[in-house]
Image (tube, grey):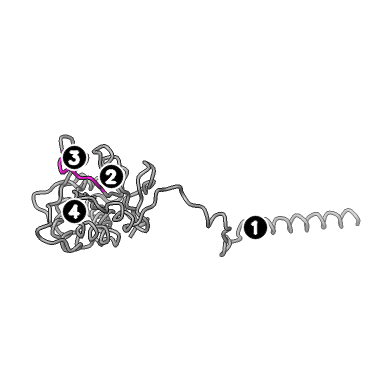
Amino acid sequence: MRKTTLALSAICLLLSLNHSAIAKESAPAPLYPGVNVAQLAQQSPVHWVSVAQIENSLNGRAPVAVGFDIDDTVLFSSPGFYRGQLEFSPGKQDYLKNPQFWEKMNNGWDEFSMPKEVAKGLIAMHLKRGDSIYFVTGRSETKTETVTKTLQDDFQIPQDKVNPVIFAGDKAGQNTKTQWLKDKQIKIFYGDSDNDITAAQAAGARGIRVLRASNSSYKPLPQAGVYGEEVVVNSEY
């Protein structure tokens, strides 16, 4: 009788432990994981600047040539790129080398692109200073383009201040962004990608990083400030 009682107790204990283990495995993640003050205070050691601070740094200087990358710098253009991938190479990046995609993107699909607020502020500031504005993009060049007109309208650039978009592309033999910056004597260049910053630095220009939006189709997101460059605050939108 004693042996039977002990056996039953052992079985009950095992069932209880097993039930606890199953309960732990199936328990959902905490709804409110919480945060501590150290996590809230953690910041990356980056040289942050505002539009006003950039303007202040130029006080007393004569007008200069200023350059801007386009995609993810002045325009949130992921909608067009997303559509292009679905239409020309679902699940792959091959569409970026398809001339048909660039014909579409450079001739109308920027109607779906959103002008970034930070770009509005920067371009307005530089126009007020009398600086010359150039847009230098890594997009492939096409026979026709409406990007210049789109940028003029989005950022209210006067007709006499408009310069045609420079399509640097990424093919061998094409003029690189660095060379274009040198050719146009651009002294300040804004961009979201590492290539934008290194091109500016190689050309002897002041490279300033604009944050790429976290929902951009262009992944992975770059590490802003990795080259010691200035990074514009709140510039992801």
Among the two numbered marks 3 and 4 on one chain, the one whose residue lies closer to the N terminus:
4
Mark 4 → mark 1, Cα distance in angstroms = 64 Å
Identified by mark 3, the residue type is Lys
* Nearer to me, 118 or 215: 118
Q: In the image as oriented, which residue stretches furthest toward the right?
A: 2
Q: Mark 1 points at which residue?
A: 24
* Nearer to me, 76 or 16: 76
Reply yes or no: does residue 126 show up in magenta: no
Q: Give the range drawn in magenta.
A: 175-189
Q: Mark 2 points at which residue?
A: 206
Could you tell whether 176 is left or right of 197 in the image? left
Among the two numbered marks 1 and 3 on one chain, the one whose residue lies closer to the N terminus:
1
Mark 1 → mark 3, Cα distance in angstroms = 63 Å
As helix, strand or loop, the secondary structure at mark 1 comes to helix
Identified by mark 1, the residue type is Lys
Identified by mark 2, the residue type is Arg
In percent of width and height, residue 141 lies at: 14, 47
The image's mark for residue 182 is: 3
As helix, strand or loop, the secondary structure at mark 4 comes to loop
Among the two numbered marks 3 and 2 on one chain, the one whose residue lies closer to the N terminus:
3
As helix, strand or loop, the secondary structure at mark 2 comes to strand
